[in-house]
Image (cartoon, grey):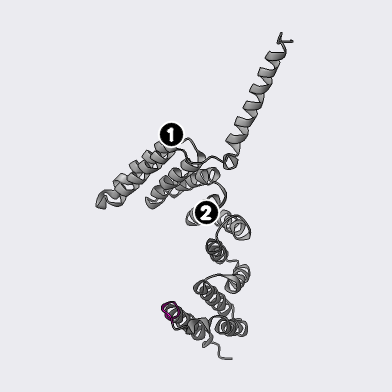
Amino acid sequence: MRLGLGRTGRRILACAALWLVAWLWAGWHPSEVVVDVVGGDEELLQEARRILRGIRGSGESRLTLRPLAAQQLIDISRRCETPEARAEILFDASELNAAGGELRLALIQCMAASRMARSRRRSELELEVAHLERRLGLLDAASRSYLRLTAGGYLSGLDRNKAAHWCARVAEEQGRTRLAQDRWRVLARTAILPQRRLLAYERLALSLCGDGLYREANSVLQELKSAIGPQSQAVTQQGKQLQHTYDKCTSRIEQALSVNVN
């Protein structure tokens, strides 16, 4: 059946169809919609902050107030005009639910928030998603999330190192010892903070000792001393703190190595 539409009618229909396609595309790809937080959203963000401050100062009644506050935040997020503001308030609700032990609900909300956020903030929320997956025992999902964030995305160097740390920890929890050891070795050599490198070296060496690979573990200890030892000698407050951690790490590794009768 043909509709009796003139040229103007056909143009209106075509424009309506294009608008519908754009609307559907934006709904499925909210992270691509670049919109700054508008004035109304700023007021909603301030309202959300007031709710959070009220929860922090609620003392013993915090446990009962937390679910109510989380629902209030959900309601506020629905009034936001921009996906960025909605993501922040939804993440606040997720944190409250996680603190109250509602981890599965928190995961759903955090995943939704990450899809609305942009660029670096999106990666930061995806890191929080990975943490929740790990806490729920969804180790395969958490491993994939951590690995993806370690390999790419917009995380800062420190957060990327954090993702790499948990990537190795999850592999350990899964019993994938050799994979975990490989990940600890990479992190020990590339992490930004010397404390993070120390911890990676220690976990690698202790894991090798657990496998009876004492010679390889001793090589790791010598690499640790060569790479981190000079930094721990710095005559600064940071150097003193690093020296304390360095001494504890090397002591634990040497103690593990001492059981090797060879």
**Residue named by callout 1:** 79
- Residue at 52 percent across and 51 percent down: it is 121
Identify the magenta region.
236-240
Question: Disc 2 marks which amino acid?
Answer: Glu
Question: Disc 1 marks which amino acid?
Answer: Arg
Count numbered badges in the picture.
2
Quadrant of the rendered image containing residue 170: bottom right
Q: Secondary structure at mark 1?
A: loop
Q: Residue furthest front?
A: 39
- Residue at 38 percent across and 48 percent down: it is 96
**Residue named by callout 2:** 124
Residue 116 forms part of the magenta stretch: no
Q: Is residue 79 left or right of residue 67?
A: right
Q: Camera-side residue: 155 or 213?
A: 155
Q: Main secondary structure of the magenta part?
A: helix
Give the class, few, some or many, for how many residues have Cα within 10 Å of label 1's Cα (few <14, many ≥20).
few
Residue 249: give x, y in percent of width and height.
48, 80
Q: Secondary structure at mark 2?
A: helix
Residue 203: give x, y in percent of width and height.
53, 74
Quadrant of the rendered image containing residue 4: top right
Quadrant location, the C terminus: bottom right
Residue 118: give x, y in percent of width and height.
55, 47
Label 1, label 2: how many angstroms apart (C-alpha)?
A: 24 Å
Residue 237 forms part of the magenta stretch: yes
Q: Is residue 113 left or right of residue 25?
A: left
Residue 13: give x, y in percent of width and height.
67, 18
Q: Camera-side residue: 118 or 28?
A: 118
For marks 1 and 2 on the same chain, the one whose residue lies earlier in the sequence: 1
Quadrant location, the N terminus: top right
The vertical placement of 127 against 196, above or below, is above
Give the class, few, some or many, for how many residues have Cα within 10 Å of label 2's Cα (few <14, many ≥20).
many
